[in-house]
Image (cartoon, grey):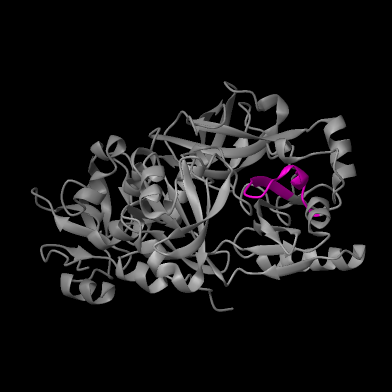
Amino acid sequence: MSFEPPTDRRYLESHEWAAPAEADGRVRIGITDFAQDELGDVVFVELPDEGETIEAGEEFGVIESIKAVSDLYAPVSGEVVAVNETLFDSPELVNDDPFGEGWMLEVETEAESDDLLSAEEYEKQIA
Amino acid sequence: MPLQTPPLRGLHAERGAKFTEFGGWDMPVEFDSIRAEHEAVREQAGIFDVSHMGEIHVTGPDATRLMNRLTTNDVTVLEVGDAQYTTITDEEGLLIDDTVVYRFPDEDGEAAYLFVPNAGNDEATHERWIDHRNEWELDATIDNRTDEYAMFAVQGPDAPVLVGEVTTGSVADIGRFEAREVEIEGIECWLARTGYTGEDGFEILAPWREATTVWGAFDCQPCGLGARDTLRLEAGLVLAGQDFDHESNPRTPYEAGLGFTVKLDTEFVGRDALERAKEEGVEEELAGFRLVDRGVPRHGYDITNTDGRVIGAVTSGTMSPTLEAAIGLGYVPVEYADPGTTLRVVVRGQSKKARVEPLPFIETQ
C-alpha cells in the first residue's frame, strides 16, 4: 500500500503533520494516513481546549483505536485557537480523511519543532 | 523464542493482514478493519484463523477418568460428537485455563477426547496431563497435536449456509455444542457448532497440511484477532490470560462467572477448595460495565466506587462496535456487581462514570 504524504505540510517522525492554515502564522495539526492505517478504527480522541498551549515535541493529546492507545505529539508550540470538535462524535473522520476533515487542532504558532520532516523525508521513513 | 506461525501466515499476509503476537504465535489481528470484520460476523459471516489454539488428544482405558479428574465439568455426560466448555483448576480451585472438550469417535473400543487449551498453553497442559496420569497410574495416551491441526471458525448468521454448501451431508442437524467428522473439499475435518463470538457458527479442525484448501472453501470476510476480541467481549465471554490469569490474577470459576462449569459431584483437582468457596460465597465477581462518560476502558485501569476508593481493575475493555459504547469487564466486590450500580473507571488519571450492565452485553445465540 502507498501512503504518499502531501507536500504542502511537514511531519514528525511520530506521524503528526502540520500544515499552514488560512490565517497567517497558524497551522493545522493532524495525523498521517500511514498512522491512521496502523491504528485502525479510531474510536476516541482527547484534545486540549481552545486557549491552552501546546509544546513542540511534547504530548498534546491521545488517540484511541479499537485495538490501541497512542499519544499525540505536537509539531509546533503555541496557543490552540481551534479544536475540531466534530471528531468527538465522529472520530472515524481521522480514518476517512486524515489530511483533511480529520484535522485536530489549529494553533497560533510560536515555535516549530526542530525535528520537522519534509514530505519526502517522511515518506522515506514510512517506506 | 521465535514466534510460531499459523499454516496460512503467507496467505494472510498476501491478503493484507496485519499481525500481532498472541500466546507465542504470530497471528492476523486485522484484515480490513476491526469494525468491518465485526459487523460482517454480526450481520452475515466471517472466518477466523485460530490455529494458535492448542489441541491435546487423550485416549485409552482411563481417558475418561483422567479427563474428569483434571477438568471441573463432567465429561461422563458426553456422547461421541458432544462438545463441552470446561475449566482447568489447581488444588486451590484457581483457574489455570478454560477449554472445550470434544468427545471424538471411540478408538479401539475406548473413549477418545480432544480438547483445546488456549494459545501457548498446550505444552504446559500436555505435561500436566502426563504428570497426573503417571501419578495416578492411569492407562491413557496423551498426545499434543497442536502442530497437526489448523483451526478455523466460521461465525455469523450466514455460517450454517456457508458451511452447509461445502460440507458433505447436512450440517443443520448439528446442534449447539455438537460436532462430527465431515469432508470439506474432500478433506476430512472435525466440524463443531461452537464459537467465541456470541453468534451461531462453527469451528473446524482441519489437517495442518490441508489448511489452504479448507480455508479457501469459504467465501466470506476474513477476520483477525481484533474482531474476535470485540465480538467475545460483547458476548460476555472471558479470555484466559486476561480476564483471569493463574499468575497475575488468580480467580476461581465462581468469581469469573464460570460456576456453571463446576460439577462438585465429580472428583477433580480443586474440587474440595471449590466446594468450600461455594459454601462461603464469593467476595468479588466479574462484572460487565459500560462507560457513561467519554473514554475507553483498557486492561489494568482502576475501577473505583463513587467515593474514589479503588475497588477493582479492568480486565478487558473496548469500544463496542455493535453498541457504539465503551464496555468492559472487571472484578469488583459483590456489593458493587449488581446491574445499574454506578462505578468509576480511571482513564489516564481522569475518573469516568460507568454503570454495571448485565452480561452478555448483547443478545447471543
Q: Residue B44 in the image: x percent, y percent?
A: 34, 42
Q: Residue B42 in the image: x percent, y percent?
A: 38, 39
Give the image quarter of residue B147: bottom right
Report if residue A59 lies within the magenta region: no
Q: Residue at x 15, y 62 (%)?
A: A9
Along the line of sight, the residue nearer the viewer: B341 or B136: B136
Report if residue B72 lies within the magenta region: yes
Q: Quadrant of the N terminus of chain B?
A: bottom right
Q: Residue at x 52, y 29 (%)?
A: B354
| Above-or-below relation of B216 to B148 | above
**Left or right of B97: which side holds B198?**
left
Visible in this render: residue A45? no
Q: Residue B72 in the image: x percent, y percent?
A: 77, 46
Q: Residue at x 46, y 45 (%)?
A: B171
Along the line of sight, the residue nearer the viewer: B282 or B271: B271
| Above-or-below relation of A54 to B209 | above
Q: Residue at x 52, y 42 (%)?
A: B174
**Left or right of A112: which side holds B342?**
right
**Left or right of B361: which side holds B334?**
right
> Which residue extends farthest top?
B340
Q: Residue B305 in the image: x percent, y percent?
A: 63, 29
Q: Which residues are magenta?
A: B70-87
| Above-or-below relation of B295 to B24 | above
**How many numbered marks have been drawn onto this rendered protein structure?**
0
**Left or right of A118: which side holds A55?**
right
Along the line of sight, the residue nearer the viewer: A91 or A52: A91
Give the image quarter of residue B43: top left
Visible in this render: residue A42? yes
